[in-house]
Amino acid sequence: MPKIPVMQAVVEVLKSEGIDTVFGCPGAAILPLYKAMEQDGSIEHLIVRHEEGATHMADGWSRTTGNVGVAIGTSGPAGTNMITGLYTAQADSVPILCITGQAAVSKLHQEAFQAVDIVAIAAPVTKWAVQVKEAAQMPWIFREAFRIARSGRPGPVLIDLPIDVQKQEIEWDSTIDEPLPVPKSVPSEARVDRALEMLLAAERPLLLAGGGVILGEASADLLDLAEFLQIPIQATLMGKGAIDEDHPLYAGMTGIQTSQRYGNASFLESDLVLALGARFGDRHTGDLATYRGDRKFIHVDVEPTQIGKVFGPDLGIVADTKLFLQALLEKAKARGPRAAGEWVDRCQELKRTLLRREDFDTVPVKAPRVFKEINEFYGPDTYFVTAIGLYQIWSGQHQKAHKPRHYQVCGQAGPLGWEIPAAIGVKKARPDAEVVGIVGDYSFQFLVEELAVGAQYDVPFVLIMLNNEYLGLIRMAEDHGGYDMKYEVDIHYDTSGSDNVKIMEAYGCSGIRVADPSEIRTSLEWARKEADRTSRPVLVEIMIEREGNTANGTSIAAMKEFEPLP
């Protein structure tokens, strides 16, 4: 077997795992890997301006492709800068691989320059963090990293590479090597039988699509089951897009923030919920006593420890969501179809009548009007990304999603600044697709430097900014959450704060500011053409009312509405 540089073997492993694009920043302690990538030439590398940006780009790429995204950094602060991205990926079950350089093994105990125990630091926010000290282990550790990232509940891994280990040679033959198999959790037949019995016995059942439906590529299977049994489907925030929101069986989103009125109403009337790949996050459930009520719950999840974590379901099933849905449908077909009945009609009635108003024509612009325009302008194939704040909550409440993996949000961790790098990752994964980021004025500036990546590598996408010149969500929490203050949340200065159009221009990009709702449609048309013309990021900055609030509450039965209802 021939001897080759160990990092050449690593590059061969990356390619065979389906990696054609990576995001990173070279440094002295990771240069052997960069040399191997340069010599190979078949993996595209985008140089980021901050290692956190690299992790979010890998995250967006992974959410779009379903494969493991890869971010690379050198030693010391490169790895610590990646922690937020690792946490974000862990929280949302996104498989990414972070590769860090490290000081030589002999220097690790001597406080050498940029030598930090990144494995210990990353351990709480990864599925696996490992340092390679034996070169011969390198290809196998990378194979195992990909297997771990993909298996069970997907998530992030980190591999730390001492510089001296990277420089060694090993015996390796890529022609007889391949990815490690990823096993799928097969559902217990007895539990599938029980789940079907409970579904058929219920008068007002709901199917709840969590993020696990999208991660498990089970959206089509979910719809097949719902249509055969005529059971309405709801989605969690992470499951948004698992079903087309215009489908007659879509029954909305339940929650105390990113919720739809008809979603909360239909949930409260339900008597059984079959939750698929859902975490029962606190901003979905709100007050648990109200959420649970007298209804029964079946919880299906690929990760055993998720079942019973928030509350004990009436039936727990450990299984891959796709395999479970296929097994359930097979058994259901053996019994015959189920008539739609009054429950489907009731959910459709709620969907028609319990809406929130969007047709505001006032100046300054009201945020719901922005999403009315977005829904009307963009087609179902558009990819959207959004992060955390009032703008994201408005998006969840008003924006329609139609296809899996097309609506992406950093749900549990909610790091500000996620949108720009995530949009770059999505666009690199789907170069021919239209990509749009919904962003707030504060989040925009957290990783604004990654605009340079979009400009340098001709990565066009549109950013739609809702600018209220506030830390809007925190202002609302201070103002209406019992604190009776607006302390250190106002970022207005001069005429209208930062000139975000000029910021775009400073990076070689372009932008436009909108202050009247009648201008939104034409600005979106301009942005689409401008992105096509320049092949660079484009901003549509919409000045919204400064103290607009999103509907919210602590219980799904007691939401506070700030705007007049239709």
Image: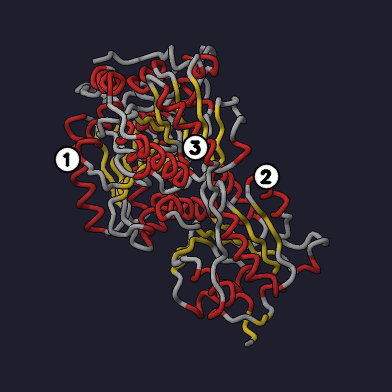
User: Residue at 52% across / 29% down in the picture?
Assistant: 280
Query: Which part of the image, by quadrant, shows the C terminus?
Result: top left
Q: The residue under label 2 is which amino acid type?
A: Pro
Give the mark, 3 or 1, whose residue is nearer the N terminus. 3
Compared to residue 245, the image places residue 341 above or below, namely: above
Q: Residue at x 34, y 20 (%)?
A: 261
Spatial CA span between label 2 and label 3: 34 Å
Marks 3 and 2: in contact by CB < 8 Å? Answer: no
Residue 124, which numbered label? 2
Residue bearing mark 3: 192
Query: What is the count of numbered marks?
Result: 3
Say if 54 sits above or below 498 in the image: below
Give the position of the N terminus as an image quadrant: bottom right
Q: Residue furthest bottom?
A: 2
**Element carrying mark 1:** helix
Q: Which mark is residue 522?
A: 1
The x, y position of residue 18, in whole percent, is 46, 66
